[in-house]
Image (spheres, rainbow, N blue to C red):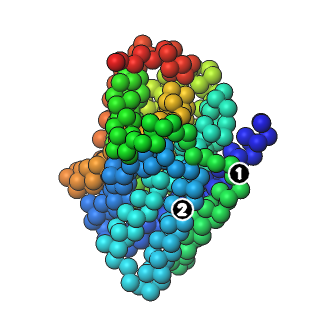
Amino acid sequence: MKGRTDHRLNWLLSSSTVSNLGDGIGKVAFPLLAATITREPVLIAGLSATQFLPWLLFALVAGGILDRIDRRMAMIAANTARAVVVGAVAVLVATDSISIWLVYLAALLIGTAETLADSAANVLIPAVVERERLEGANSKMQAAEIVGQTFLGGPVGSLTFALFAAFPFLLNSAGFAIAAALLLGMAGSYRPRQDTERRRATLRTELAQGLGWVRRNPLVLRLVLIAAAVSLASELAQAQLVLYALEDLRLSPAAFGVFAFAGGIGGLAGAAAAPRLVRATGRRTVLAVGILLCGAAFLAMGISTSAVASAALFGLFAAAVVAVNVVLATVRHGLVPSELLGRVLGVWRTLVWGAIPVGALAGGVLTEILGRPSATFAVSGVLLLGTGGAAILLLRGYRTAVDTLDPRAAPVSS
């Protein structure tokens, strides 16, 4: 069984790494493309908001769907759809037919497919590893995301964009297509079990069940609210990262990818250290301290005028936020029943990832008001420090449930 589990996890990780490479290329190439069309902070922030708006609109529905269908096949279909859309963007860029509104449309379509693909990858983890190996599997999944999106995707996206603007979008499309093909190597069915009552239930009823479960579970509800606050506060600054690098730090588009590379290094360090830190200090401590470090890093970036120092601070932020994400994912996998995982994840990401477009637009407006992206980073840092303090207060009394992943230690109201 162990060999089979490792084998299936390896296919899942391989597919996720390649799709995240495509994501990483696109994460740099799309803002750079937008910046060649306009330098308006609100329009740049609007791109980030558009990319994540589907999480606010469709994450809950995606979670309900994933509790009804084969989750591997959902990933294959979603990655194939993303490959087609990004391929169309490459053609539009190559023929000089692109506009900011077509960029927005493509971002919206890709983001919609992403709600299904990324959610499916997340809920598949408990199906391919044993419970005691969840922390390690989540760390590996975070590492795959970092390697693909930042460590490799960022530099590749910026360098290929500098060579030929359509080039990164061609690579992005190929990455999604390969990711879909790799999932064919995962043997078995990944459709969740359904009893007779569930088969008769409507999707609307099942979504209500997921919402009700989160509302009645005080620990999971607290974690969702903490994660949403971190997401909102972080995106204030992250949506302005390209302007922060190009305007405040005076970096070139190619150097922007290298700047993001520092985030990849930090993120990998955070993914590698998270299981060890959890064993040494406990999950609640890693969660709270990680959020506080995120705030300190962004506040310092808002003050810094050195590209090297800012890159190092961005790496610190990435390490801290990845450690926080590993803890949150592991606790969610440990406390949520398997048959509810898709719907609970849908609720989670509706609030957490749905906060990203709100934060992105607010960050654009804030930069317009304050005049500099670095000032927005400082505000984001202060808000994250406040969120870390709130997390300490909200999770007081829940150390046992968080550290042991024992649902019985997390009281559920009736």
Q: Residue furthest toward the right?
A: 3
Mark sitting on residue 323: none
The residue type indicated by label 2 comes to: Ala
Outermost residue toward the bottom in this view: 95
Q: Nearer the viewer, residue 29 or 369?
A: 29
SS under mark 1? loop
Count of number-bearing discs: 2
Position of 167 with respect to 6 (left or right) is left
Which secondary structure, mark 2? helix
Residue 275 seen in the current view: yes
Measuring from the top left, give residue 48's x and y in whole percent. 36, 57
Per the image, the residue denoted by label 2 is: 77
Could you tell me the amino acid type at mark 1? Ala
As rendered, which of 64 and 136 lies closer to the eye?
A: 64
Residue 119 rendering spot, x and y as whole percentages: 49, 47
Report which residue position mark 1 lands on: 187
Q: Which residue is at a point 59% across and 43% down the rendered structure image?
A: 124
- Foreground of the two, 364 or 206: 206
In the rendering, at what x and y percent does residue 169 appear? Answer: 52, 72
Quadrant of residue 395 in the image?
top left
In the shown orientation, is residue 401 left or right of residue 109? Answer: right
How many residues crowd around disc 2 within 10 Å: few (fewer than 14), some, or many (20 or more)? some
